[in-house]
Image (tube, rainbow, N blue to C red):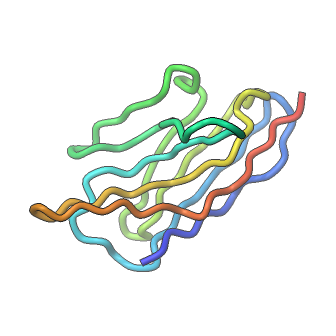
Amino acid sequence: VTLVQSGGGLVQTGGSLRLSCAASESIPGINAMGWFRQTPGTQRELIATFTRGSRLFYADDVKGRFTITRDNARKTLFLQMDSLKPEDTGVYYCKWHQRDGDYEYDYWGQGTQVTVSS
């Protein structure tokens, strides 16, 4: 199973981008799906996530600007990013967490660069 990301790029401050993360096949036992951002010299930070029961979480600095959605039929996770700021620049990764009894595994996308120019 692979997660394939698309949709990054270069945008000016105030612009919008939509990231996609599509699974190559259905993954049983997924109980969390989310997006992370990484900048040089830092660890990946959680930006937005669905957890079990469709609960949503957003990091404080993206609340009101980013929206996480999913299309279960298309096995795809999205991140709509509006009102982008230069500090949103980084490599964005999607992660799907699988839990099946005692078995747990994290699937990661390949990462996509988002650059916001000032």
Does residue 74 appear to the left or right of 13 in the view shown? left
Residue appearing at x 35%, y 44% in the figure: 50
Residue 103 location, x and y as percent? 18, 65
- Quadrant of image for the C terminus: top right
Q: Which of 107 and 24 is in front in this view?
A: 107
How many labels were placed on the picture?
0
Q: Which residue lies furthest to the right in this view?
A: 118
Does residue 59 appear to the left or right of 113 in the view shown? left
* Residue 7 sits in quarter: bottom right
Vertical position of residue 4 compared to residue 52: above or below = below
Q: Nearer the viewer, residue 74 or 103?
A: 103
Residue appearing at x 80%, y 42% in the figure: 115
Does residue 78 appear to the left or right of 96 in the view shown? right
Vertical position of residue 71 compared to residue 55: above or below = below
Residue appearing at x 73%, y 31% in the figure: 84
Q: Residue furthest top?
A: 60
Residue 6 location, x and y as percent? 66, 63
Vertical position of residue 97 compared to residue 117: above or below = below
Residue 62 location, x and y as percent? 57, 26
- Quadrant of image for the N terminus: bottom left
Q: Residue furthest front?
A: 41
Residue appearing at x 70%, y 32% in the figure: 88
Vertical position of residue 115 compared to residue 64: above or below = below
